[in-house]
């Protein structure tokens, strides 16, 4: 049939799988949204198992719908949600808690405190980043 590249995009609101042929043409795409969790004002979370299930699901559906022989898949590229974080229990393979999404602002108060303490320049020089809840996990 030919050679393919599969792109897996685990985004902020959905999981996607894209099939591209050796000419760079998009041959198929499957997308599935997943639930957004807002336990408190400014908090944004995802169910890590749902993320995994939807990503695997769109991959399997893409392969099935397009009758792809896995021997023809030459590469898989993966993108994900920027600074979203999840901790998995190494013994059980289960998430310890929901994924904390990059949009979450629960550490905004800590970040403001660090700025007021005059640490902005130190953080920028040592990390190359600004103090922002986007980067800061307590």
Image (spheres, rainbow, N blue to C red):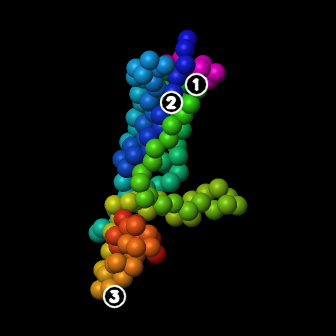
Residue 31 to residue 28: above or below: below
Q: Quarter-wise, where is residue 113 in the image?
A: bottom left
- Residue lying at 32% horizontally and 85% vertically, measured from the top left: 118
Sort mark 3 into few (<14), some (14-19) or many (20+) by Cα contacts within 10 Å. Answer: few
Regarding residue 27, the answer to whether it shows in the image is no
Q: Is residue 68 magenta?
A: yes
Outermost residue on the front side: it is 125
Whether residues under marks 3 and 1 lie with C-beta atoms below 8 angstroms apart, the answer is no
Q: Secondary structure at mark 1?
A: strand
Residue designated by label 3: 117
Q: Which mark is residue 73?
A: 1
**Could you tell me residue 132's position as x and y percent?**
34, 70
Residue designated by label 2: 6
Q: Quarter-wise, where is residue 88 in the image?
A: bottom right
Q: How many marks?
A: 3
Q: Which residues are magenta?
A: 66-72
The N terminus lies in which quarter of the figure? top right
Regarding residue 127, the answer to whether it shows in the image is yes
Q: Secondary structure at mark 2?
A: strand
Task: Name the front one of labels 3 and 1.
Answer: 3
Q: Quarter-wise, where is residue 25 in the image?
A: top left
- Residue lying at 70% horizontally and 61% vertically, measured from the top left: 91
């Amino acid at each position: 049939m030919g050679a393919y590249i599969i792109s897996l995009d685990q985004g902020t609101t959905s999981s996607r799988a894209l099939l591209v042929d050796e000419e760079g043409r998009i041959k198929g795409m499957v997308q599935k949204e997943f639930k957004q969790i807002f336990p408190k004002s400014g908090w944004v979370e995802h169910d890590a198992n749902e993320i995994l299930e939807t990503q695997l699901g769109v991959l399997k559906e893409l392969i099935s719908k397009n009758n792809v022989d896995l021997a023809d898949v030459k590469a898989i590229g993966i993108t994900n949600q920027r600074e979203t974080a999840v901790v998995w229990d190494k013994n059980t393979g289960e998430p310890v808690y929901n994924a904390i999404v990059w949009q979450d602002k629960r550490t905004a108060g800590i970040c403001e405190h660090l700025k007021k303490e005059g640490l902005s320049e130190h953080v920028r020089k040592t990390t190359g980043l600004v103090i922002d809840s986007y980067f800061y996990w307590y």
